[in-house]
Amino acid sequence: MSDIAEVLYTEDEVQEQVGALAQAITDDYGGRSPVLISVLKGGVVFLADLVRRIDLPLRLDFMSISSYSEGGDSASGVVRILKDLDHDIGGEEVLIVEDIIDTGLTLSYLMSALWARQPASLEVCTLLDKSVRRIPMLDIRYRGFDCPDRFVVGYGLDYAERYRNLPFILAVTDVNALADQPHALDPFVAAVPGGPAPAR
Ligand code: IMP
Ligand code: MG
Protein backbone atom coordinates (compact mmCIF):
# COMPACT_ATOMS: atom_id res chain seq x y z
CA MET A 1 0.00 0.00 0.00
CA SER A 2 2.95 2.31 0.58
CA ASP A 3 6.70 2.28 -0.02
CA ILE A 4 7.17 4.20 3.21
CA ALA A 5 5.88 1.65 5.71
CA GLU A 6 4.82 -1.98 6.07
CA VAL A 7 2.69 -3.85 8.57
CA LEU A 8 4.94 -5.21 11.33
CA TYR A 9 2.25 -6.64 13.64
CA THR A 10 -1.31 -7.20 12.45
CA GLU A 11 -4.35 -6.38 14.55
CA ASP A 12 -4.82 -10.10 15.31
CA GLU A 13 -1.21 -10.49 16.39
CA VAL A 14 -1.45 -7.42 18.64
CA GLN A 15 -4.70 -8.62 20.23
CA GLU A 16 -3.27 -12.09 20.82
CA GLN A 17 -0.33 -10.62 22.75
CA VAL A 18 -2.61 -8.23 24.68
CA GLY A 19 -4.71 -11.24 25.74
CA ALA A 20 -1.64 -13.21 26.82
CA LEU A 21 -0.29 -10.27 28.86
CA ALA A 22 -3.70 -9.68 30.49
CA GLN A 23 -3.85 -13.37 31.46
CA ALA A 24 -0.33 -13.31 32.95
CA ILE A 25 -1.15 -10.16 34.97
CA THR A 26 -4.45 -11.64 36.16
CA ASP A 27 -2.66 -14.80 37.32
CA ASP A 28 0.28 -13.01 38.99
CA TYR A 29 -1.77 -10.40 40.87
CA GLY A 30 -4.59 -12.73 41.94
CA GLY A 31 -6.25 -11.49 45.15
CA ARG A 32 -4.60 -8.10 44.89
CA SER A 33 -5.67 -4.73 43.55
CA PRO A 34 -2.85 -3.19 41.49
CA VAL A 35 -2.66 0.39 40.29
CA LEU A 36 -1.89 0.54 36.56
CA ILE A 37 -0.06 3.67 35.52
CA SER A 38 0.00 4.87 31.95
CA VAL A 39 2.30 7.51 30.56
CA LEU A 40 0.35 9.76 28.19
CA LYS A 41 -0.27 9.61 25.38
CA GLY A 42 1.27 6.62 23.61
CA GLY A 43 0.31 4.01 26.19
CA VAL A 44 -3.42 4.68 26.34
CA VAL A 45 -4.53 2.54 23.38
CA PHE A 46 -2.73 -0.51 24.73
CA LEU A 47 -3.90 0.23 28.29
CA ALA A 48 -7.54 0.49 27.21
CA ASP A 49 -7.47 -2.93 25.52
CA LEU A 50 -5.36 -4.54 28.25
CA VAL A 51 -7.45 -3.54 31.27
CA ARG A 52 -10.66 -4.83 29.72
CA ARG A 53 -9.10 -8.29 29.62
CA ILE A 54 -7.64 -8.26 33.16
CA ASP A 55 -9.90 -9.93 35.70
CA LEU A 56 -8.84 -8.01 38.83
CA PRO A 57 -10.19 -5.07 40.86
CA LEU A 58 -7.52 -2.74 39.48
CA ARG A 59 -7.26 1.04 39.50
CA LEU A 60 -5.86 3.42 36.86
CA ASP A 61 -3.77 6.54 37.10
CA PHE A 62 -2.03 8.69 34.50
CA MET A 63 1.12 10.74 34.18
CA SER A 64 2.37 13.04 31.51
CA ILE A 65 6.07 13.70 31.10
CA SER A 66 8.27 15.58 28.71
CA SER A 67 11.89 14.83 27.96
CA TYR A 68 14.48 17.53 27.91
CA SER A 69 15.62 16.37 24.47
CA GLU A 70 15.11 19.69 22.66
CA GLY A 71 18.28 21.63 23.30
CA GLY A 72 19.00 19.69 26.48
CA ASP A 73 20.84 16.48 27.12
CA SER A 74 18.77 13.94 25.18
CA ALA A 75 20.84 11.00 26.41
CA SER A 76 20.20 11.66 30.10
CA GLY A 77 16.60 10.43 30.16
CA VAL A 78 15.83 13.20 32.64
CA VAL A 79 12.16 14.06 32.34
CA ARG A 80 9.90 16.79 33.60
CA ILE A 81 6.56 15.75 35.07
CA LEU A 82 3.85 17.73 33.28
CA LYS A 83 0.97 15.94 34.98
CA ASP A 84 1.55 13.89 38.09
CA LEU A 85 -0.48 10.94 39.36
CA ASP A 86 -3.76 11.85 41.06
CA HIS A 87 -3.16 9.48 43.98
CA ASP A 88 -0.34 8.54 46.33
CA ILE A 89 1.20 5.16 45.43
CA GLY A 90 2.81 4.57 48.86
CA GLY A 91 2.22 0.90 49.79
CA GLU A 92 0.49 0.12 46.47
CA GLU A 93 1.23 -2.62 43.93
CA VAL A 94 2.11 -0.51 40.91
CA LEU A 95 2.35 -1.65 37.30
CA ILE A 96 3.58 0.82 34.67
CA VAL A 97 1.98 0.17 31.27
CA GLU A 98 4.06 1.41 28.33
CA ASP A 99 3.61 1.33 24.59
CA ILE A 100 7.32 0.98 23.77
CA ILE A 101 10.64 0.96 25.54
CA ASP A 102 13.50 2.15 23.37
CA THR A 103 16.75 3.13 25.11
CA GLY A 104 14.88 2.78 28.41
CA LEU A 105 16.32 6.05 29.72
CA THR A 106 12.92 7.69 30.18
CA LEU A 107 11.49 4.68 31.98
CA SER A 108 14.54 4.28 34.17
CA TYR A 109 14.28 7.88 35.34
CA LEU A 110 10.54 7.53 35.89
CA MET A 111 10.99 4.35 37.91
CA SER A 112 13.49 6.02 40.27
CA ALA A 113 11.02 8.85 40.80
CA LEU A 114 8.22 6.36 41.56
CA TRP A 115 10.34 4.11 43.84
CA ALA A 116 10.99 7.21 45.97
CA ARG A 117 7.25 7.18 46.80
CA GLN A 118 7.65 3.73 48.39
CA PRO A 119 5.17 1.53 46.51
CA ALA A 120 4.87 -2.08 47.76
CA SER A 121 5.98 -3.21 44.29
CA LEU A 122 6.77 -1.59 40.94
CA GLU A 123 6.70 -3.59 37.71
CA VAL A 124 6.62 -2.79 34.01
CA CYS A 125 4.41 -4.06 31.20
CA THR A 126 5.32 -2.93 27.68
CA LEU A 127 3.73 -3.95 24.41
CA LEU A 128 6.91 -3.37 22.41
CA ASP A 129 10.47 -3.78 23.62
CA LYS A 130 13.30 -2.51 21.40
CA SER A 131 15.68 -4.48 23.59
CA VAL A 132 18.70 -4.08 21.29
CA ARG A 133 18.62 -0.34 22.03
CA ARG A 134 18.57 -0.67 25.84
CA ILE A 135 21.08 1.47 27.76
CA PRO A 136 20.30 1.12 31.51
CA MET A 137 19.60 -2.29 33.10
CA LEU A 138 15.85 -2.65 33.36
CA ASP A 139 13.85 -5.54 34.67
CA ILE A 140 10.77 -5.72 32.44
CA ARG A 141 8.27 -8.19 33.85
CA TYR A 142 5.81 -8.25 30.92
CA ARG A 143 6.56 -7.71 27.22
CA GLY A 144 4.39 -8.26 24.17
CA PHE A 145 6.92 -8.20 21.34
CA ASP A 146 10.71 -7.97 21.15
CA CYS A 147 10.60 -5.24 18.50
CA PRO A 148 13.28 -4.75 15.82
CA ASP A 149 15.22 -1.48 15.83
CA ARG A 150 12.86 0.30 13.43
CA PHE A 151 10.62 3.35 13.79
CA VAL A 152 7.09 2.13 14.39
CA VAL A 153 3.67 3.82 14.42
CA GLY A 154 0.11 2.76 15.20
CA TYR A 155 -1.73 1.34 18.22
CA GLY A 156 -0.90 4.45 20.28
CA LEU A 157 2.47 5.22 18.72
CA ASP A 158 2.71 8.38 16.68
CA TYR A 159 4.68 10.22 14.10
CA ALA A 160 4.10 13.96 14.68
CA GLU A 161 0.92 13.05 16.65
CA ARG A 162 -0.52 11.05 13.73
CA TYR A 163 -1.41 7.36 13.33
CA ARG A 164 -2.13 6.58 16.98
CA ASN A 165 -5.54 5.22 15.97
CA LEU A 166 -4.29 2.43 13.69
CA PRO A 167 -5.30 -0.94 15.21
CA PHE A 168 -2.10 -2.53 13.83
CA ILE A 169 1.57 -1.55 14.01
CA LEU A 170 3.55 -0.30 11.03
CA ALA A 171 7.33 -0.21 10.64
CA VAL A 172 8.40 2.87 8.74
CA THR A 173 10.85 1.92 6.00
CA ASP A 174 11.65 5.46 4.86
CA VAL A 175 11.63 7.92 7.76
CA ASN A 176 12.98 10.76 5.59
CA ALA A 177 10.08 10.42 3.17
CA LEU A 178 7.65 10.55 6.09
CA ALA A 179 9.33 13.72 7.37
CA ASP A 180 8.74 15.29 3.93
CA GLN A 181 5.12 14.08 3.74
CA PRO A 182 3.63 13.58 7.23
CA HIS A 183 0.33 12.45 5.64
CA ALA A 184 2.01 9.71 3.60
CA LEU A 185 0.53 6.90 5.72
CA ASP A 186 -3.06 8.18 5.53
CA PRO A 187 -3.97 5.31 3.14
CA PHE A 188 -3.40 2.93 6.06
CA VAL A 189 -5.88 4.93 8.17
CA ALA A 190 -8.40 4.86 5.35
CA ALA A 191 -8.02 1.07 5.14
CA VAL A 192 -9.08 0.51 8.76
CA PRO A 193 -12.52 -1.19 8.80
CA GLY A 194 -15.02 1.55 9.61
CA GLY A 195 -12.30 4.17 9.17
CA PRO A 196 -12.50 7.20 6.92
CA ALA A 197 -13.44 6.51 3.30
CA PRO A 198 -10.48 6.76 0.94
CA ALA A 199 -10.25 10.12 -0.88
CA ARG A 200 -11.79 9.96 -4.37
P1 IMP B 1 13.37 5.85 25.57
O1 IMP B 1 13.69 6.76 26.71
O2 IMP B 1 14.46 5.87 24.52
O3 IMP B 1 13.06 4.43 25.98
O4 IMP B 1 12.12 6.51 24.85
C1 IMP B 1 10.90 5.87 24.77
C2 IMP B 1 9.89 6.82 24.13
O5 IMP B 1 10.34 7.20 22.81
C3 IMP B 1 8.57 6.11 23.91
O6 IMP B 1 7.72 6.27 25.02
C4 IMP B 1 8.05 6.76 22.66
O7 IMP B 1 7.35 7.94 23.02
C5 IMP B 1 9.27 7.14 21.89
N1 IMP B 1 9.61 6.15 20.85
C6 IMP B 1 10.66 5.30 20.84
N2 IMP B 1 10.67 4.54 19.75
C7 IMP B 1 9.58 4.91 19.02
C8 IMP B 1 9.04 4.45 17.75
O8 IMP B 1 9.56 3.56 17.05
N3 IMP B 1 7.89 5.06 17.35
C9 IMP B 1 7.28 6.05 18.06
N4 IMP B 1 7.75 6.50 19.25
C10 IMP B 1 8.89 5.94 19.73
MG1 MG C 1 5.77 6.52 25.78
Image: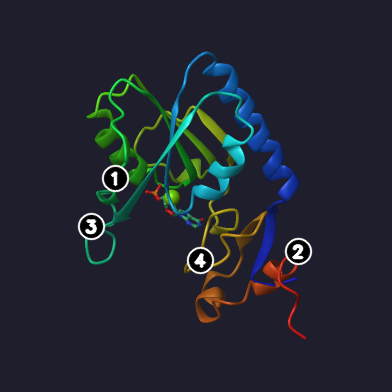
Say if disc 4 is inside 8 Å of ligand 1.
yes
User: Going 55% across and 80% down the picture, which residue do you hit?
Assistant: 181
Marks 3 and 2 sit apart, C-alpha to C-alpha, by 43 Å
Task: Classify 156 as above or below 122.
Answer: below
Badge 4 is on which residue?
159
Give the label, 4 or 3, closer to the camera.
Answer: 4
Name the amino acid type tagged 4: Tyr
Identify the residue under disc 1.
84
Name the residue that disc number 3 marks.
73
Mark 2 vs ligand 1: CB below 8 Å? no
29 lies above or below 5: above
Between circles 1 and 3, the one closer to the viewer is: 1
Question: Closer to the N terminus: mark 2 or mark 4?
Answer: 4
Identity of the residue furthest to the bottom in this view? 200
Q: Residue at x 56, y 23 (%)?
A: 56
Q: Which residue is mark 2?
A: 194
Residue sticking out furthest to the top: 31
Q: Nearer the viewer, residue 42 or 136?
A: 42
Q: Secondary structure at mark 4?
A: loop
> Which sits earlier in the primary sequence, circle 4 or circle 3?
3
Q: Earlier in the sequence, mark 1 or mark 3?
A: 3
The label shown at residue 146 is none
